[in-house]
Amino acid sequence: MLATISGNALVAPASGIATTAAYSGVALPSVCKRFETTAAWSAGDNTGSLGMITNPHGLGLITDITTGSLHVIITPAKIDIGIYAGSLNVLRTISFAQQMQKDGTIYQNIYEVDGDEMSYSLWDGTEGAVSHADILAYNGQFVTVEHFRNTALGTLPVFHSAFASVL
């Protein structure tokens, strides 16, 4: 499924099947050092998540992001930072004291990668960092944004912006 620009947001339409994923990506000139998102959920979205994924392998094939990549998975209740190499190994879960509202409110999250450490600054004021050797190994110049949902019901969350930088 392809995501499209609609109403100043990157959206993916409902597919009507149990699992829906849409991917959009960009190849940076060198390793990604910073990425940030602004995202929103709607009232009908009860199972959706958004992902920011970097990898050193390539862009365009699902194996590029499943054979070794750095994942940040965003839901209204939490953010998981992890490494995906065949399955997701969650390095840190950050649960919000209050969930993001499902009313179109736009939330911003910022992540910076320096070697084997990823720092984060989240919409609710939470800041911190997580370190792991695989962050260095699986971060890369290829950046993918993902819309994901586990059921055929509801709407997918939307990206109002997704920014990636080598600086």
Image (cartoon, rainbow, N blue to C red):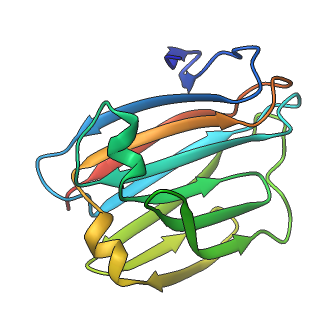
- Rendered-image quadrant of the C terminus: bottom left
Say which quarter of the image contains residue 68.
bottom left
What residue appears at the point 55 percent right and 34 percent down from the top-left corner? 160
Q: Residue furthest left?
A: 29
What residue appears at the point 50 percent right and 72 percent down from the top-left corner? 120
Q: Nearer the viewer, residue 4 or 153?
A: 153
What residue appears at the point 47 percent right and 49 percent down from the top-left corner? 52
Q: Is residue 90 left or right of residue 25?
A: right
Say which quarter of the image contains residue 117.
bottom left
Total number of numbered discs in the rendering = 0
Coordinates of residue 48 in the picture (x, y in percent):
74, 39
Coordinates of residue 37 in the picture (x, y in percent):
51, 48
Say which quarter of the image contains residue 137.
bottom left
What residue appears at the point 59 percent right and 16 percent down from the top-left corner? 7
Q: Is residue 40 left or right of residue 159?
A: right
Q: Is residue 24 left or right of residue 30?
A: right
Residue 50, compared with residue 155, is above or below; it is below
Residue 92, compared with residue 4, is above or below; it is below
Q: Residue furthest front?
A: 86
Residue 26, compared with residue 122, is above or below; it is above
Coordinates of residue 129 in the picture (x, y in percent):
49, 83
Coordinates of residue 74 in the picture (x, y in percent):
64, 53
Q: Nearer the viewer, residue 61 or 155?
A: 61
